[in-house]
Image: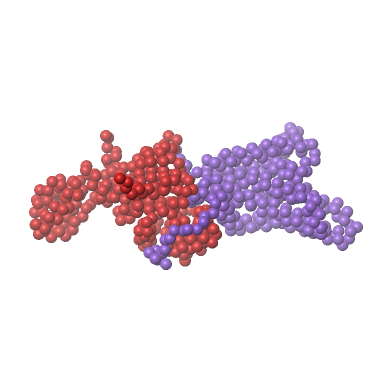
Amino acid sequence: MSVDTAGYRRWAGRQLPNALACWPIARSGLVLVLRRKLFWLLLALAALHFLFIFATIYLKFQIAAQNPGLERFVNQVLRSVTGTGETYREFMFRQGTVTMLVLAFAGGMLVGDDMRRGGLTFYLSRRIGRWHYVVGKLLAIGLLVSLTTTLPALVLYIEYGLLTNSFSYFRENLGILVGILGYGLVMAVTLALLLFALAAWLHKTVPLVMAWACLFVLLPALGELLQDVFDDRHWLLLSLWRDIRLVGTWFFGGIDTERELAMLNPSLAIVLGVCIVSTLALVPRVRAVRVVQ
Amino acid sequence: MTGAPIPQPLCRFQAASKWYGPVIGLNDLTWDLPPGITGLVGHNGAGKSTLIKLLTGQLRPSLGRVLVRGHRAWTAAARRHIGYCPDVDAFYEEMSGRAFVRMLARLHGFSSKTARERTDDVLDQVDMAERADRPLGSYSKGMRQRIKLAQALVHNPDLIVLDEPLNGVDPVGRVELIRLFRSLADRGKSLLISSHILDEMDTLADQILFICRGRMLASGSLDEIRALLDDHPLKVRIAAPRARQLAAELLRLESVRSAALESEGQLLLEVQRPKEFFGPLAAAVAEQACDVQRLQVIDASTEAIFDYLMETAKRPR
């Protein structure tokens, strides 16, 4: 159709609220990430651990069903799949490595490119505020985190419950569901804010991966070393992933030891601190114009 | 007596200023955007980008107000009247043009179905419907410009702000885009076009806004602005067989400041107050029965006027 014959009529429909604009931003971000083969490879890696636990749970129930005498033995051998909160918490914790890899490579695409190439202008010139953009991108990162941690943990929880052949597992272990969701939320929010802030400042993938590795590989290693040298467990707080786990454990209601309890408040303070500093760091970057001195 | 209500301008700058720390981006600009196509002309760093960012609500003025249909420019109510086509064209390379436009349509609150329909409609308008499913990374510069234009038009805005829209577009594409701009203007849209290719402004823009160092130098149609430049007489070249006699006749006119015979048959006149010149010129030509082969105003182009304005602005007061 030629330009001259194109009808140019005023649209008279109802527009959706601005807040819903976060979803298309998150969705398009996820689509962009999932177009890359690298991410499918990383997600496949994440799925390996999940499939292993999934199969283990299935195997455990099959053995117990076919030979009830072996149930106690199987429970002793397969301690990691007892169906308690610890099973899911440990699963989510162990997904950390691959989650970190996914995020390290996705940050540049999801946020860094917008800052570096000026794509932010396309968003900020529309009828949405910059917080819609920020929330949309955080949502995309949070969903990526959930894709490798919370979602598979939920699937395992459902699998375990269904294999018990009664709904009593779900009724009696609602706390586990709260724990999975709570731990997942803490992980998603903290990592999303941190990744957004880092990507907003570093832009490119390589520096971002290096910074991410420093935070999640070097700092924990340093913490372990300093703990050995000074014989002080507080050095372990340098591992953010461990701090997140401790806060997540609180959601499972499973902080048993005095030692863990003593570390809970400092861990919570660190997680909150990271969230606040990241939020403050990203605010000045989500602007359309920067003055070059 | 109560007259008809004064129509509210689509966009109004009221003593708007913008500082970036010690740097001034825009200085005390008071200006109403006229209907039709308006060209925004200025050197690099003159304040064009700041003006555009203020208008599209990406920046707030440090002082003064920028209103779009009576709403402050950074509010959602104002932004729905504006479509912005930025100069950057490095967007999501893996995404298809259609998906890109549709995603941005959804940010305006359209449902998925409506966003799809509007995207198809607008891709048709910019002649990209056939090629919109290819990834953006495979597009030429001209195709990217069209996609940017499509995303600016997708919510049917009243004002379309275009930053260097013809950059990198081939000559055929330019003609098509200029025709599209004109067609949009004819349908009642206002267009603000920033461009450093001043030749294009001569044919494209109805009005021009010249800015320099954050200040407005002049605004209006080229003819109006040219007529106000008293210090710079209009230069008119006339080719006629009896140029010498014609020069003698024209020198009698008060509006003609000088006449120079460039070659036999070619005359260069310096004219003050052009409005008072062309009527008597026609009379003189008729009286002399002179066969004028060519009449050319050589310094009424955007570029010439811009140079004159810059010269005037630099002169100490």
From the viewer's side, name the closer residue of B317 and B222. Answer: B222
Q: Residue furthest right?
A: A69
Return the x and y of residue A229 as percentages of the image width and height.
Answer: 73, 34
Return the x and y of residue A78 as percentages of the image width and height.
Answer: 82, 53
Q: Quadrant of the C terminus of chain B?
A: top left
The reply to whether residue B196 is in sight is no
Name the residue at 38% across, 53% down: B191
> What's the coloring here?
by chain
| B134 relative position to B163: left or right | right
Q: Which chain is purple?
A: A
Q: How many marks?
A: 0
| A79 relative position to B189: left or right | right
Relative to A166, say whether B216 is above or below: above
The picture's colour for chain B is red
From the viewer's side, name the closer residue of B122 and B172. Answer: B122
Name the residue at 35% across, 58% down: B186
Relative to B130, say whether A170 is above or below: above
Q: Residue furthest top?
A: A230
Q: Quadrant of the N terminus of chain B?
A: top left
Q: Residue A42 is drawn in which quadrant?
A: bottom right
The reply to whether residue B308 is in sight is yes
Name the residue at 9% across, 57% down: B287
